[in-house]
Amino acid sequence: MKSELKKLPRGQVELTIEIGVEEFQPFLDTAVKKISESVKIPGFRPGKAGYDLISKKVSETEIWQEALEPAVRKTFVQALNEQKINSIGAPQIDVIKLAPGNPIIYKATVALLPTVELVDYSTIKVAGKPVKVEPDQIKKTLENFQKMYAKETLVKRPAKIGDKVDIGFETFLDKIPIDHGKNEKFALVIGEKTFIPGFEEQLIDLSESDTKEFQLKFPDNYHQKNLAGKMAEFKVKMNGVYNLDLPALDDEFAKSLGEFNGLKEIEDKVAENLKAEAQAKEDARLEEEMFEKLIAQSKFDDIPDLLVDSESKKMMEEMEYSLQQQGLKFEDYLTHLKKTREQLLLDFVPQAIKRVKSALIIRKVGETEKVQVTDEEIEEELHKTIHAYGHDPEMEKSLNTPAYRDYLRNVLTSKKVINHLKAVMTKQ
């Protein structure tokens, strides 16, 4: 086998590979045996007829075509090793010459795993910010918790601040209905300011079945650019007014939940959760700053389109899943943005490139520092995951596989590398 290497733009190479006739012979023998199992030759059992007999039943070209795929699979890997190429993804194969009795020649275009020349990260410093939980945060969370257990009672009186109301409304710009500006059943609590400024105040003193028309200006920084700063007309109908009877935030309320012995335990748990949430945000901010600096000061080979496309699609899948978890439809989100899937994918490209470069840095640091994950660590993480799913037999079966263990190994290795980088880069 002979191979020649040609570098292409955008992190790709082209291999021209030639397979000699003698080297190709074993693949022809295997192909003949396979074909003879489905072709009847008088006097021969299936799979036992030789090349000459089979070539009379089918064309010689068909035999060579049958032998080509396994030959390409084997010689392509040999060529990668010979040229010391670290490739990613499946190659694009173009057959240049396939003629019985002659050497086979084909070209394989493949993307390269980019190399990175890593900056001395011990010279780069990032600073973490202290995490604090303010009393007002705890108070607000407890109030939201309190509202979750409020008793709702339909009342026949005008709405006031603190009431929950069920309304129907339509929104118009210059007397023309706006897209997604109509809702026949919409619930809100007057005073919580979940709608545009001034809207909730217009609902005060409305009773069940009352209607009202009014104008309001959308905020200049409103997320829908076509509405930002515009004066709109609203038509509202009050479907129902509900009095909210909030339970007292005391020890009795805490005990009624069955998890706590008193209000102090709830406050402590809320503070713990808020601190953990704040710490997670700070960790994410610190990691982002850390990788921004590492990327800016390191040198990368060309990033193949294959990696960028793959990461962009992964980001879109993450967004789609997140919207589904919020009860939203991805297609509605695209309509709101006035974009197609393809246009959104293009928007993801800059961030996708950063994520690819971050992954390359993690891989490089892991190799340089010889970061390893033990089988015991993988088993421990697997046990935690299975326990989190309540030891569901089907889930346990799907997780307890070599593929999932490989996934866990990669995840845990990345965590170790990131923790190592943080330890070095935050050290004063």
Image (cartoon, grey):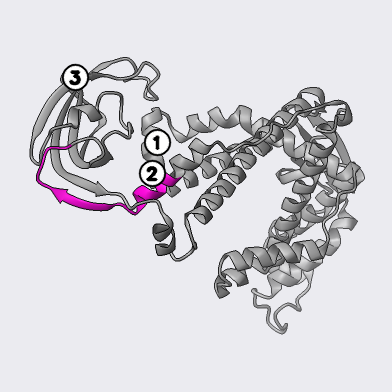
Is 15 displayed left or right of 312 in the figure? right
SS category of the residue bearing label 2? loop
When the figure is inspected, residue 283 is found, relative to residue 235, above or below; the finding is below
Magenta-colored span: 142-159
The answer to whether marks 1 and 3 mark residues whose Cβ atoms lie closer than 8 Å is: no
Do the CB atoms of the residues marked 2 and 1 lie less than 8 Å apart? Answer: yes
Question: In the image, what residue occupies the spot 60% across and 39% down?
Answer: 278
Q: Residues within 10 Å of mark 3 (few under 14, many from 20)?
A: some
**Which quadrant of the view contains residue 156?**
top left
Number of other residues with Cα within 10 Å of mark 2, as a class: few under 14, some 14 to 19, many 20 or more: few
The correct choice, above or below, for 396 with respect to 191 in the image is: below
Q: Check if residue 222 falls in the magenta segment.
A: no
Q: Say what amino acid the circle numbered 1 marks.
A: Tyr
Locate residue 158: give its quadrant.
top left
Left-right relation of 404 to 239: right
Please name the residue that numbered disc 1 is placed on.
Answer: 333
Pinpoint residue 189: horizontal percent, then vertical percent. 27, 39
- Looking at the rendered structure, the kind of residue marked 2 is Leu
Label 1's element? Answer: helix
Is 122 rendered above or below residue 53?
A: above
Residue pointed to by mark 2: 328
Please identify, in this view, whether the residue under mark 2 or under mark 3 is nearer the observer.
Answer: 3
Q: CA distance from mark 2 to mark 1?
A: 8 Å
The residue pinned by badge 3 equals 215
The answer to if 149 sits in the magenta stretch is yes
